[in-house]
Amino acid sequence: MSICEKQQALLRKLPGVDIILAKIQDDNDFFQIPKSVLVNSIRSVIEGLRTAIVGGQEISEKNFSESLEINSIVEKLKIWVNQVMTLNLRPVINATGVVVHTNLGRSLLSTDAVDHILSVSGRYSNLEFDLSTGKRGIRYSCVEDILCEISGAEAAMVVNNNAAAVLLCLDTIAKDHEVIVSRGELVEIGGSFRIPDVMAKSGAILKEVGTTNRTHLKDYENAIATSTGLLLKVHTSNYSVVGFTASVSLKDIVELGMRYQIPVMEDLGSGTFIDFSRYGLSKEPTVQESIAAGTDVVTFSGDKLLGGPQGGIIVGKKNILDKIKKNPLTRALRIDKLTLASLESTLRLYRDEEKAIQSIPTLRMLTTSFATIEKKAFILEKELKTLNDSRLRIYLKNLSSCVGGGALPLLGLPSKCVGIKVEEMTANHIETFMRMHTPAIIGRIEDDLFIMDLRTVEEDEIPAVTGAVADMLESVTNNGPG
Ligand SMILES: *Cc1c(COP(=O)(O)O)cnc(C)c1O
């Protein structure tokens, strides 16, 4: 038979969709699957086989025609349908040690916040309804009081994220006016947030002063003109200028603003209510300090150091916040009820700092002791040893984790890691297997080891990590390396 005739013969063997549908009619594995998914999946599987036949390469393999048997097609279909039915967005185990990991969802919510989401999302709520008057209420009122209580500000408001908060403030306060910013603070944050670009979008005009490493009060003062609408301080949250440097304190900028009757804004970015230096970490400016210094408006993220849901929080003077709330952009940037619910619960935890540290996962992981991390590393080591596989080698390492989310960039937090090596597998192979596993285990490679940092792995996740390693060892047994 010529190649071409062989291909024709194989193509004729391909069953039709109806035949496969009839075959799987009583198969339990397909009971719950919507018909549309079944039909599309069958078409995809058959199409895959057709492509293989026409391509002509695989058909020369010894058992190719077996893959056209209906039972073999049904097995393929099961895997395909399973993939289609698995949710795309799903939990992973973060073994990178990076606490505020933007790619892995930044901050984990506290149990209180998750419970609150559950309680209001499946039912009606008083989202925009004032229960005392029976009239339309304000969406943000459930968090405004608590934000003022914790920060000491006169008024507050929340939008979709901090990028939106900065945009909204600039648009409200300084559209068509100059905004004076130090050249040392023209920040770029991952995900293409750049101060100059946001400024341009808002219609405000950037007026850079000073130099990259040194800016003085007189630089701000000399730049003030009738067209000046705002003095802006940006917290350089994700980098540090070191060496011969000078920057102007918020207090001095506020004092200057008062003298010239120009409002002052601070974009804190990471935004924290807690003085981290009390927990052995380096000092980050707190929201309370910024408000106490007299800043007119302060913006920060809900899901960086605050440890809540994604959101952009704006706190400050009432006259400015009133204007911001009336800006039509607010409607386009508004947050939904799930965010509000989790934010309200997260904020309430800050009434008791000790409780906040214990129950907000971001804070707990940042302040957790080396001994606690080490204990988890020992447990993982012990569990891996019970796999009793001589191909697996386990190493305990003292390395450091970082905060992430563009916060405290210079700070390395001492941590305990478990590194693994598997005979006949490269570190890259291990990393790939663990990442593609369900649940995915995300770690890093260092010195040819796959490293798992236990700072960000919860104790109840350790069995899943061990399970993934067991699956990996089994797959090497079955398929050989690679
Ligand atoms: C992170 C950050 C932003 C952006 O905040 P998102 O909540 O990610 O939108 C803006 N400014 C600064 C200084 C930041 O650190």
Image (cartoon, rainbow, N blue to C red):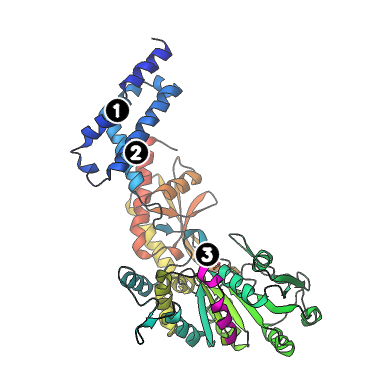
The reply to whether dot 3 and dot 2 touch (C-beta < 8 Å) is: no
Compare residues 234 and 355 and report the one nearer the observer.
234
Q: Secondary structure at mark 2?
A: helix
Q: Quadrant of the N terminus?
A: top left
In the displayed structure, 424 sits above or below 291; it is above
Q: Which residue is mark 2?
A: 40
Mark 3 and mark 2: Cα distance apart in space: 45 Å
Q: Secondary structure at mark 1?
A: loop
Taking the spot 43% from the left edge, 22% from the top edge, the residue there is 54
Say which label, 1 or 2, has the lower sequence index. 1
In the displayed structure, 94 sits above or below 184; it is above
- Residue 279: x percent and y percent? 51, 79
Q: Which residue is mark 1?
A: 16
Q: Which residue is mark 3?
A: 401
Q: Quadrant of ligand 1?
A: bottom right
Compare residues 173 and 232 and report the one nearer the observer.
173
Q: Is residue 324 magenta?
A: yes
As drawn, the residue found furthest toward the top would be: 1
Taking the spot 42% from the left edge, 14% from the top edge, the residue there is 4
